[in-house]
Amino acid sequence: MEEIRVLTPTGMLGYGFPVKWFKEGLKRNPHVIAVDSGSTDSGPHKLGMGALTCSEESYYKDISIMLEGGYEKKIPVIISSAGGAGSDKHLKIFIDIVEKICKEKGFHLRVAAIRGEVSKELVKEKLRQGKIKPCGPVDDLTEAEVNKANTIVAQMGVEPYLKALEMGVDVIITGRSYDPAPIAALGIKEGFDPGPCWHLGKIMECGALCAVPAGKTMFGYLRKDHFVLEPMDPELRCTETSVAAHTLYEKSHPYLLPGPGGVLDLSECRFEQIDDRRVKVSGSKFIPSAAYAVKLEGAKQVGYRTIFIAGVRDPFAIKHIDEILEGVEQDVVEYFSDIPRESYEMIFHVYGKNGVMGEHEIQKEITSHELCIILEVAAKDQKTATAVCSRARTELLHFPYEGRVATAGNIALPFTPLEIPLGPVYKFNIYHLMEIDDPCEPFPIDIYEF
Amino acid sequence: MKKNTKKLTDVASVIRSKNAGPFEVTLDIIFNDKQTYEKIKAAGVINKELIAKLYGVSEDEITEFVYYDAANAVKATLVRPRHQGSVGETDMHAAQQHVPLLEIRIPWE
């Protein structure tokens, strides 16, 4: 094959995409429709509790359109990192969605489900063998932390995809995956240089986010030593700058991108404008690593949270806000002297002061005429979190301060319930690289015929 | 504004911050064109020390600081100030942490 054409309808499955631009892509006869649905960006609770990034309805809609396209063109549809976090629970939800669509539309499809959740036993065994190390600025992993994790997934590389493609399936749905893998897979299977394959994957896993203005549906032409990007919405343009800019998006290093099995080296990359809307990228190199490692992600529950949301408009209260909040916290801590102080946290988020930047805020003086205060309380159970939050709210409402003229109350409360329970809160407690001998071993494939 | 200086927004088209995984935040500055990029890179005004100062962190907390010629860009990656999406989070995607960069002034003749 001289060229592999990849259609990616959107940068994140479930966010929706215009059907007309997807159909524009189908007209170009793609060899594969591939989309990523994974990210750690919206936090650890999805992995911890199995929550979905988008609603089941939105996944159903997006997957329906993709399966129709794949069915019409008789090409594979690949969806990675089911549900956002890619646990077994997420994968099952996606497989059920595919089954439902097949029944409703009368499609007969052979579906591969590649699992990405890994057992604590495997992780502990690898830990004992010294095959697990931190990925970035995180502590060394311990067995105790492995035991505390609610769910652990591993980001699969391209090899399990190749295995599934060899099985002649119409649809591949995976658990947690390295984001570029679903897009890179077919090119690598067909023997294309893995450098451009991975780089194309890295850019297209975000759909048309690399275009100006940013959009959804992207079409990629993979050739022997380069690839070309073309956004499907004619109002969007890829430019040398926009594509180059996207190459370094959300990565620690701008041109060395480590992944399963090697490093993508983009130091010698060239971005060339070939017409108004299309950019050619060449010079992307993939350097295989000596040992094959996959990234582990784990989340543990750290407690329950309750918040209240309040406004402050009084200029005298704003002037004294720091001492008011300190005083409130002190009173609450004294009141709950029976609860160990280290078992709960009280964090005031003060919008109008430093709500967004926290300690990194460069503007030290409050210039806003009103503030929004959110008190976040985290405790070992919901009841305690709500009790502490409630006590702080009433204390703040009536806390005396110097120069107070408004003696009826210090805060304006917009919502009931005044205290809002947020449920369990999680933390990423595993973010490590695990060396494996066989890139397919932790990722078993189940085949379904619908 | 000081004489003979330019604001970063005058010379860069992208100034952004974003999570790079759950434990790092990465800052990107992408300059308008090759000439501007080369001039600023050579001048050395934007360096690790400046980033550390702007964010009130030690240089050890900057895990990467790299100029990327192919994209006319400079990237700095910092240890995230708190666990992403857990207790105390203020910016889940770290998408609004670029603002201190807007303070940068580039000497210009």
Image (tube, coloured by chain):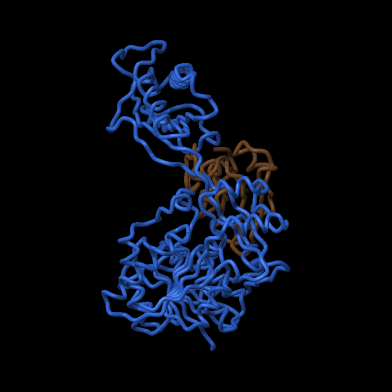
Q: Give residue A230's quadrant in the image.
A: bottom left
Residue A227 lies, in percent from the top left, at 54, 77
Q: Nearer the viewer, residue B75 or B60?
A: B60
Question: Is A256 left, or right, of A45 in this rendering?
Answer: right
Q: Is residue A92 above or below residue B98?
A: below
Q: Which chain is blue?
A: A
Residue under the point 42% across and 33% down: A351
Q: Quadrant of the C terminus of chain A?
A: bottom left
Q: Quadrant of the N terminus of chain A?
A: bottom right
Name the residue furthest front.
Answer: A121
Q: Give residue A68's quadrant in the image.
A: bottom left
Q: Nearer the viewer, residue B66 or A323?
A: A323
Q: Is residue A135 above or below residue A110?
A: above
Q: Is residue A287 above or below residue B94?
A: below
Residue under the point 60% across and 50% down: A146
Residue A17 lies, in percent from the top left, at 34, 66
Q: Which chain is brown?
A: B
Question: Is A281 left, or right, of A366 in this rendering?
Answer: right
Question: Is A194 left, or right, of A358 in this rendering?
Answer: right
Name the residue furthest bottom.
Answer: A1
**Residue A350 in view here:** yes
Residue A448 lies, in percent from the top left, at 41, 76
Q: Is residue A150 above or below residue A370?
A: below
Residue A415 lies, in percent from the top left, at 28, 33
**Residue B98 in view here:** no
Q: Count numbered badges in the picture.
A: 0
